[in-house]
Amino acid sequence: MSILALAAVSVGVVQLLSGRMVGGDGAWTSWSLDRKEEAAAQIDRPKLFFISGSSGNFGYSAEQLSDALGVDVVNMASHAGLSVPYFAYLATRNAEPGDVVVLPLEYEAYSRLELTAHTTIVDFERGLDVFGFLALREQLEYLRVFPVGELLSVAGQFLAGEQFTPPNSGYWRYGVNTYGDLDLPEPTRNGALKALDSAREAEDRRLYVSPQTARYLTALRDDLNSRGVQLILTQPPLHEFASLSDDGIRGLASELEALGLEYHFLFNDNRIPAEMMLDSRYHTGASGRRVATARLALMLCDTVDFDAMTVEGETCTAAKMDEQRAWSNSFGSMAGFAQEDSFTQIRYRPGGSAQLRRSASYRGPDFDVVTPVGCSSALFFQVRADVQGATISVLINGEQTLTHEFNELLESGVTRAWSDRVDLPVSNNELVHVEFAADRWSSQTNDASMSFNQLYRETRCD
């Protein structure tokens, strides 16, 4: 058989097998992108969609953005194993005139020098569409990094008549809704510590723009602008203790802006409280996602004229922006309350309070606080007992640290609030258990023992 004939047969075999699931993260990425592109295709008017690795999957909510902005929004984030050329391909493929495309890429994505095997696997599973989008240099890379072993595995499955069965593990645990958002849980204790380890692994040396990234992002900008599509680069959500410096992040932004790619910063560099992080420096839990999305919404409302994107109702209303602003500022008003093995995030609106209700064998809220080694942490609170004469004690790792008796009443008839702070010890496991224990309760069924106006951790690291 001639070389040309062999090549033709090889191409035919690859095309025959393409579209079949290989397995692992690549299969989930392919499946989820199919769902997300289906959601985008249902919208027949200008829309906003965002593309990134898993930071956008876990960190931003299209549903919340749509409600806040008053426009159609789709979450088209996927997996950080994909390369910037693939993200550019997704944007080009799905953008229509009048759309807004947001790229909150992970910082390390900008420095990638070549295609990844994950990119080729996903393209193979989705029908080999991206290969023709690539420049010759990346096409050669594609052929070099393509995992032939995976192709042989799929060929074996095909010949055996086997079908891919999604496992109940990894990313497959998370469903995708009609906005393209993941169904996220809240963090667990082990997950919070895993996220802290991931935060420490971040390195400034990876904060730069590679030639490949520069070529594809500038070409994407030019293509989208010529079609009446706005491109916005911005920050991903990031663990508050991630070891990326402000100078490093701003240096990366300066490189992008030197290429004519404006970079938009978010409140506090979109650093998210440690108790809100799921399992990595870029993965938030459900409440962390709400905080990160609120910051993105505020920036977008200041940057984009959304009036042309809606046919009914107002965009970026004052009431919606006030709600997002309250979440954006959550550093001063959050707590991670532990229920069994998981953190449940509680956010208090400014000027309001949240009552903590009685249940069986329950003296008050108890929760874990992340306290990194090498840092000093304190818990600040303002709490009010709902029964005159009640005493509330603060216990740290089971030992009583502070106590207060609520005897004084205000003119309104409620007890005067107790404002204080407690320094948190640093332990090797970097979690401190905190309990607020009341000695008495109201006689009403399910009535409250105490209300918090404020509860937050403040940490300073050398």
Image (tube, helix red, strand yellow):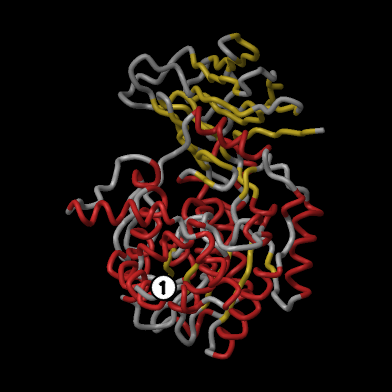
Give the left or right position of residue 342, taking residue 160 as reference.
Answer: right
Q: Which of 217 and 239 lies nearest the eye of the viewer? A: 217
Q: Which of 432 and 196 lies nearest the eye of the viewer? A: 196
* Mark 1: few/some/many CA within 10 Å (<14, 14-19, 20+): many
Name which residue lies at 70% across and 65% down: 210
Give the left or right position of residue 328, taking residue 206 as reference.
Answer: left
Residue 287 percent location from the top left of the image: 48, 45
Name above or below for residue 209 compared with residue 281.
below
Name which residue lies at 73% across and 70% down: 256
Q: Which of 153 and 229 lies nearest the eye of the viewer? A: 153
Name which residue lies at 46% across and 80% down: 95
Q: Which residue is mark 1?
A: 72
Helix, strand or loop at mark 1: loop
Please state which amino acid type lies under the numbered disc 1. Answer: Asp
Residue 281 percent location from the top left of the image: 60, 43
Name above or below for residue 41 compared with residue 254.
below
Image-quadrant location for residue 264? bottom right
Res. 323 visible in picture: no
Name which residue lies at 50% across and 82% down: 307
Image-quadrant location for residue 419? top right
Residue 244 percent location from the top left of the image: 73, 47
Name above or below for residue 255 compared with residue 155.
below
Image-quadrant location for residue 104? bottom right
Name above or below for residue 229 compared with residue 342.
below
| Label tally | 1
Q: Quadrant of the C terminus?
A: top right
Res. 66 visible in picture: yes
Residue 189 percent location from the top left of the image: 50, 28
Q: Which of 303 and 170 lies nearest the eye of the viewer? A: 170
